[in-house]
Every structure is written in C-alpha cells, then in structure tokens.
Amino acid sequence: MTGTSALYQEIILDHNRAPRNFRRLEDADRSAEGYNPLCGDQFTVFVKLEGDRVVDVSFVGSGCAISKAAGSLMTTLVKGRSRAEAAELMEGFQRLVTGQTEAGRAAMPPQLAAFAGVREFPVRVKCATLPWHALKAALESRSEPVSTE
Amino acid sequence: MGAKILERAGSVPAESAPFDIRRIREDFPILARRVHGHPLTYLDSAATSQRPQAVLDAMTAHDTTANANVHRAVHELSRLATDAMEGVRAQAAAFLQAAHPDEIVFTSGTTAGLNLLAQAYGRKFLRSGDEIVLTEMEHHSNIVPWQMLRDQVGVVIHAAPIADDGSLDLGALRRTITSRTRVVSVAHASNVLGTVNPIATIAGMAREVGAVLVVDGAQAVSHLPVNVRELGCDFYVCSGHKMLGPTGVGLLYGRLPLLEQMPPWQGGGGMIASVTFESTRFAPVPARFEAGTPPITQIIGLGAAMEYLERVGFAAIGAYEGALLDYADRRLAEVPGLRILGAAPEKIGVISFALEGVHPHDVGTILDREGIAIRAGHHCAQPLMHRLGVPATARASFALYNTTEEVDRLVAGLFTVRSVFC
C-alpha cells in the first residue's frame, strides 16, 4: 500500500466507518448542499445557530472516505464555535490539505493533522474540502448548491 | 510469456494463434513505464486507449515531411497532406464498411458527431412534439445534445429502460418507439456496463416507424468489427482516441441521401462553394460539415490506428479480449464483497464494480499507488447511476494489450483495498 497509509490514517478510517453527526437536523436554521460534479459526491450540511454561535451542526450525503471523514470531523470541531471561528478553521483546513500550512500549528485542532496527508494526493483535495464548502455556504446562507468546480 | 498468458486465458481459438500478446505490448511504448514505483497496469482504455508506435510514427512522419494545410493550395506539401487525409477518409469508409468515402465526415470526436447530428439533422427535420428515443445506458454526450435540441424545437425525449442484468429491455424499447419517433440514438456498447446492444434489431424497430437510427460507437469500434450496412444504422459516430488513435479526431458516418439533405453545422472555410456578403453556397458532402482546418495530423494518426486494428484483426482481438473478460470475471468473483454491475450476455471488456463498504474513489486512489489505473465516478452516465442505485462505480476496462497478469494485479490490489477498509 505504497504511500496510501499517509492518506488513510486510522482517525480518517474511523470517521468514515462511523461518521459523527451524520443525520438531518430537523430544527436547523440553515442548510446547504455541496456537490462535486466530477465524481458525484454530494453532502448537505445543517446548522443551528444561536446568535452568532453554531449550537448544532450535522451532515448527510454520500462520498468517499476522505470527504465523509472530513465532514464528520468538521461537525465535531465546529459545534460551539462562532461563525468567524468556523470560517477561520476552514481556512486553516484548506491551507493544511493544500500544503500551505504544516500540521501541528497552535491554532489548529490536533485532530485535523490526520488530513495533512491529503496534500500528497492533489486529486483528492476537493474531496476533503467539499463538506467545508457546504458549511461555509450554510453559514453565509446561500441557497444555491455550492460546487467544487 | 505471451503464449503462456494466452494459455492461461483459456478458450483462445486456433485461428488467433498469430496474436502474440508480448509483441502487441511492445508496440505500445507507454506500457513499459512505471507508476509510483510499479509497472503500469493500464485498465482505463474505455476512457482513452493507448497509442501504438505506428500511430505516433505516422503523425511524426507527416509533421516532419508533409505538414501543410489541405485543399486549395498548388504546392507539393499541400497535395501530399490532402492526399493523405483523403486516403484516411477512404480507409475509414472501408473500416466501417460504408458504401462511399463521401459518407465519412471528420469530426473532433464522438461528442462533436452527436452535436452535429442533433443540430444539422435535428433542427432540419424535427418539429415540436416529435420524439427522440434514447436508452438508460447512454453517455451524457448522447443525452445533452438532444436536450439542447429539445429546448430549441420542442421535441420530446424518452429513455428506454435497461433490464437488471444491464442489457437493453427490447420489449420496452419496442413500446417506447412509436409513430411519433423521429430519431433513435443508442450506444453500440455501454461505457459503464460493457453491454453490446443488438443494433440490427433496433434498426429494424426504427425503420418500421420511419425513424433514423444514430449509433454511438465510441466504445465499440476498437473491440468489434463494425459494418454500418449490416447494422442498418443511418449514422454512426466514434472517436479516434478510443480506438488506438490520437485525441481531437473522430468519424461520423452518415448515409449519403441523409447527409445530402442536411444543412451545415458550423460555418467557415472549407465548407463553401462560393461566398459573397449576400449569400453563400455550401460545399457538397462531406466538406460541407468540415468547416475550418481539420485536425490533419490526428486524422493521419487515426488512419494508422485503423490499419493497426485491421492488421491484428477483429477475429483475434475479439477472441483474446473475450477470454480476458472471462478470466477477469472469474478472478474478480474471488474478492469478497465485490459486485459486478452489468452481466449482459454480450459484453466488451468493461467491468464496473462496487466493493462493499468502500467508495469507488478510495478504490481508485489505493490502486493508483500500486500503478493500477482504473476509473471511479459516474462515467458521464448519471442517469444510469440513478438506475443502478449507486452514486458512482469503479471501472476497469480492457483493450487488446491487457493481460491476465494485469487482472491478477488488479485482484491483488483489491485485496489491499479491503485490508485498509474492511
């Protein structure tokens, strides 16, 4: 398995097998769909806000292990944060998977370090960022599905 | 080694004895390269096939000795280029068993051919309420151009269903084709299921109601001998790059009486008889459909590709690929949780599969690191994905240069995938 262990780390496999917050949020204030037209991966992210704070977040849909695990970890990290903090997390995640930031920086939740391996697989970067794009769209309340293209 | 592989592949009939897989592979220089430290195992020929040295050499020879624009020049190089291109047209007519070289139009590929037909034939002959019959297994390129036509003239599109084994439901197709049907457009072979459709039977159904039959031959032409007159189709389209030739070139066959009634698709140089600012008289068929400078180098490459396929021979190719497909079916059945999508009685070497609990993209990424190139996704056939109830599939597709050893590598790679996920 040359090199794929860097991508399929245990934490990613675990979140793929048993995604957290993988359900519709019936009392969500906002939701948005993320879609990758190249491969058909599709997720909907639901957000419940209290003022500026994300009090609950969930997702449903279908996609590969990378996108599903990214969505799952995302929901665990974003819950309880302000919109600005969530946006900052997303930016950090984007820099991490594209190789612009090293893992283990102080501002970065340690769980996300597992995604540093994605940078070695450029065609999979969009998988990792797909649910984050959907979250961003939900927080910005865009009703059109967001596309990775 | 070649003989051994053939032996292992099983039922290869005696008449294909000259088919020497080792020598075939040596004709394709790219097959010698390594990917991620492993020998390349190229199982994505349904997306694009590899090119033999003969094709590369023909293009280089043209570019280094005879490159010039075709038609209308008095100089020697232009004559050479024109002769070479028109020679390929005659060759393509013979390859598809067309009645006349004028029935062959050079396009940029299957997609362009289908768009040409939707616009040039569709806009001329179809009216609001007329019906077009497709099938559930069509590639987007045989759906979207007809939808664009629908939005222009108000035609109605029907998709005939497939049976659960991935073959066309011919009874349902017969019911879908009615007196209102003007065009039936179907794949000769499915790029997802591998199913080979009974074109001659479908041609009979289309003829009964006076509809024209368009055949998308992109997946078929490098695997099966095509005889457009025996098939009874009115139009046949294919792409150079899926038949051992280069990208950017394709063929459109059309029955001459139909082509002659069709207006041009695109306007420009090469397709006119005379032009004034008041009006233009169009060139006769097929030049009428070839506006602009054609992909001359690629056309010459395509000529070499057809020559290569004919030299190996479709009897030998069919026997070898058929045995390889049987072998792959047997070996893949050993992988726990693997389900093959598409079990039609007649198939080309295209195997779509689902591996329980693993998304096709993850299958593709792990196999890639083993040097194995497969495709994962919707294969430009989203309506078929809906029909099959999957968001995507993994797909291994074979050409005449693949081996049982490569099938073994695929199977070993799939066990590696399982070891990561299951």
Image: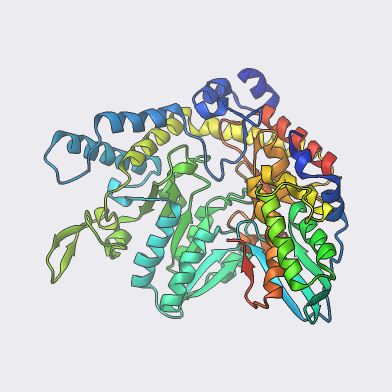
- What colouring style does the render use? rainbow
In the image, taking residue A21 as reference, residue B150 lies left or right, namely left
How far across and down, in percent of the image, does residue B300 sit?
Answer: 33, 37
How far across and down, in percent of the image, does residue A43 sit?
Answer: 73, 66
Q: Residue at coordinates 64% horizontally, 24% vertically from top-left? A: B6
Q: Residue at coordinates 53% horizontally, 20% vertically from top-left? A: B23
Picture layout, residue B381 above or below residue B83: below
Q: Residue at coordinates 74% horizontally, 56% vertically from top-left? A: A67
In the image, taking residue B66 as reference, residue B130 lies left or right, namely right
Quarter the C terminus of chain B occupies:
top right
Residue B336, quarter of picture = top right
Residue in front for this viewpoint, B109 or B364 = B364
Q: Is residue B371 visible to the viewer in this orientation of the structure?
A: yes
Quarter the N terminus of chain B occupies:
top right
How far across and down, in percent of the image, does residue B253 sit?
Answer: 37, 52
Picture layout, residue B15 above or below residue B195: above
How far across and down, in percent of the image, does residue A21 sit?
Answer: 86, 66
Picture layout, residue A82 above or below residue B74: below
Residue A91, quarter of picture = bottom right
In the image, taking residue B223 as reference, residue B111 lies left or right, namely left
Q: Is residue B354 visible to the viewer in this orientation of the structure?
A: no
Q: Residue at coordinates 49% horizontally, 43% vertically from top-left? A: B242
Q: Count of labels shown?
A: 0
